[in-house]
Amino acid sequence: MTGAGFSLAGKRIWVAGHRGMVGGAVVLRLASENCTVLTATHAELDLTRQKNVEDWMAANKPDVVVIAAAVVGGIHANDTRPVEFLNDNLQIQSNIITNAHRVGVQKVLFLGSSCIYPRLAPQPLTEDSLLTGPLEPTNQWYAIAKIAGVKLCQAYRREYGRDYISAMPTNLYGPGDNFDLMSSHVLPALLVKTHRGKQSNAPSIELWGSGTPMREFLYVDDLADACVFLMKNYSHDAPINVGYGSDVTIRALAELIAEVVGFKGGFTFDATKPDGTPRKLLDCARINALGWRAATNLKEGIAKTYDWYRANRAQG
């Protein structure tokens, strides 16, 4: 299951999506790898346009590509913008993977998501549970696109012998996250709500759902480290999970964030709002067996994220 040892030294590595939270962290991590990092802003390159991607890749000739570019968001965003979550993501990943083959890219790392797995698959989620049951309806559009990306990488491996791999991260958070309450994921949304609650001395904060779903959270710098590790050490048809290794309830997450932020109020839960998947913990036995584990615990990661939010995004 391991690769023979792929060296990044001297390589031209294109990080697609470098302005996003994940891509930005990957760029920082690659700074110590003696490689040349290639990036392109949206103004320079529209990834949904096949000809644009073809021309850019032909001109810049990357040796390695990390596909961190995607349309992402939480339950509300997924549910109300299905076209963008399905079609834009299909176009982005297909354009990059197809042209990687055309220009002779040596290695591609496609980043998927733990939401590709069936809603009620046995926990913790193993890579083998892919396509064994129905998806979670609230993120099905994104999941279908990501599954297609995994399959396209597998297809190029099978038909052309390409070293294209897929990694499935769990829920991510950290500096550079999306803190917009209508489109963000649960952890940054809770951070913003709790910060504002502290500022206004609110007696309580209302949260979506019941507070009982279980979620696993991985600090983005740990994912970036895993990406570099996998590019060097993994070459296999199967996607590989990247997670922290344990999960918490949404209520427990809210209480931990309140502790970090210094919010003294309580929480109420709006049970009319959706919970999403009941539990989503990744089985990380495969990547752990290769020698990689996450280094940042949840409280430490939340504190770092909150520091970044206050310095860069907080209003008041």
Image: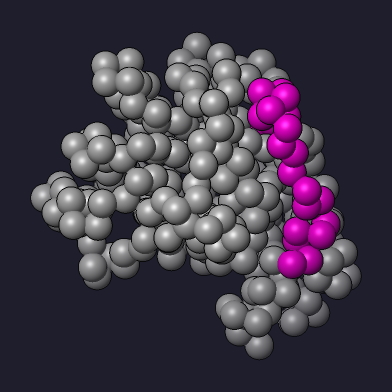
Tell which residue pokes out farthest to the front in this image. Answer: 10
Residue name at image x 69 percent, y 28 percent: 290
**Is residue 171 at least partly visible in the picture?**
no
Q: Is residue 292 magenta?
A: yes
Which of the image's four quarters has the N terminus? top right
In this orientation, which residue lies closer to the viewer: 127 or 77? 127
In this orientation, which residue lies closer to the viewer: 162 or 148? 162
Residue 165: where, in percent of width, then height? Answer: 45, 30
Q: Would residue 198 appear left or right of 270 to someone viewing this image?
A: right
Q: Is residue 114 magenta?
A: no
Residue 215: where, in percent of width, then height? Answer: 70, 39
**Is residue 312 at least partly visible in the picture?**
yes
Residue name at image x 63 percent, y 49 percent: 225
Tell which residue pokes out farthest to the top in this image. Answer: 132
Residue name at image x 42 percent, y 60 percent: 37
Residue 230 vertical placement versus 156 (above, below):
below
| Magenta-colored span | 277-304
Tell which residue pokes out farthest to the left in this image. Answer: 51
Residue 16: where, in percent of width, then height? Answer: 37, 54
Which of the image's four quarters has the C terminus? bottom right
Residue 245: where, in percent of width, then height? Answer: 76, 34
Q: Residue 285 appears in which quarter of the rendering?
A: top right
Q: Would residue 309 appear left or right of 17 to someone viewing this image?
A: right
Residue 20 vertical placement versus 120 (above, below):
below
Q: How many marks?
A: 0
Q: Residue 152 appears in which quarter of the rendering?
A: top left
